[in-house]
Amino acid sequence: MEWINNLNMAIDYIEDNITEEINYEKLAKIACCSTYHFQRMFGYMAGVSLAEYIRRRRMSLAAVDLLNSNEKIIDIGLKYGYTSPTAFNRAFQNIHGISPTKARKHDTSIKSYPPISFKMTIKGVEEMNYRIEEKTEFRIVGISEKLHKNIEENFKIVPKMWEEASTNGTISTLVSLMNEEPRGMLGVSACNNDQEWRYFIAVSSSKPIGNNFKEYIVPSFTWAIFSGSGTGQSIQELEERIITEWFPTSGYEYANGPDIEVYINPDPNNAKYEVWIPVIKK
């Protein structure tokens, strides 16, 4: 229950600061995890990204202000962080489907998004196969791209990386370098609080590399390792179940380390994979 309580305290922080800049690092500290992991947890638990949730809350409150006050539209926009009337108008229309001017008419339909409240629910009908493993640091080599601190902005970067790597020969070259555990193509989100966030498509290897590839040392951690199989989409479903079903009652919490997807058999129609989550005992 402590984990759920921490999430609800983070929601309280958002509500208390809804007209100010929301500090993602503060939110993560309240939830006792890294900024990256908090955003991932929130997205799976709430069914919407953190950035989108904050937008919806602000535009919901802005609609109330439009209906119940005589404040200028531009001042209401400024109140919720929009220095440009155009940006406020666009954000408002994206949420409510109408302009702020039309929303002031009392016979106009607008949307309301109340604050989220997290609760423990009984799930987990299907089994989950996992093991806890201590592993010393290991080296991976591959290609890398910088990630944004707002993970919503990364949804296009990572799929594009995989698409290009599969068509330009990068993956086959990396496979030839693989000679260490874990065996498989790796998708590594190196997004701890102490360094620039990056995503790697890589393999575990001790072999020398040329200028086309970069190396990254995965630190020593305790890992919760979940195995699965199915289509490419099923790994996302497994990650969601880890967050929503396993973590709340596991006795573990996120450590400040990378998330790793291990693609043992990359066939999109019959994939075999593992999800490695860095954890610490509560």
Image (tube, rainbow, N blue to C red):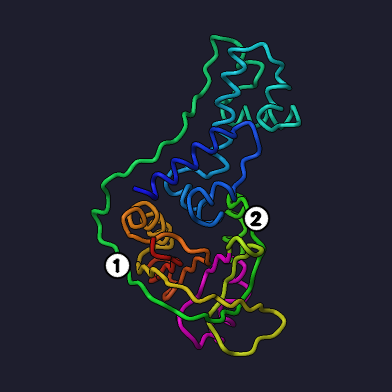
Residue 105: quarter of image: top right
List x then y, in percent, for residue 162. 57, 66
List x then y, in percent, for residue 46. 44, 43
Secondary structure of residue under mark 1: loop
Secondary structure of residue under mark 2: loop
Could you tell me the amino acid type at mark 2? Answer: His
Say whether disc 1 or disc 2 marks the residue closer to the N-terminus: 1
Residue 178 position (above or below residue 106): below
Using a 10 Å C-alpha cutoff, classify the residue at mark 1 as few (fewer than 14 neighbours), some (14 to 19) or many (20 or more).
Answer: few
Range of residues picked out in magenta: 162-190
- Quarter of the C terminus within the rendering: bottom left
In the rendered image, which residue does mark 2 sit on?
148
Locate residue 146 relative to residue 33 in the image: left or right.
right
Using a 10 Å C-alpha cutoff, classify the residue at mark 2 as few (fewer than 14 neighbours), some (14 to 19) or many (20 or more).
Answer: some
Within the magenta stretch, is there residue 189? yes
Could you tell me the amino acid type at mark 1? Answer: Asn
Locate residue 184 relative to residue 210 in the image: left or right.
left
Query: Which is nearer the eye, 24 or 206?
Result: 24
Residue 146: quarter of image: bottom right
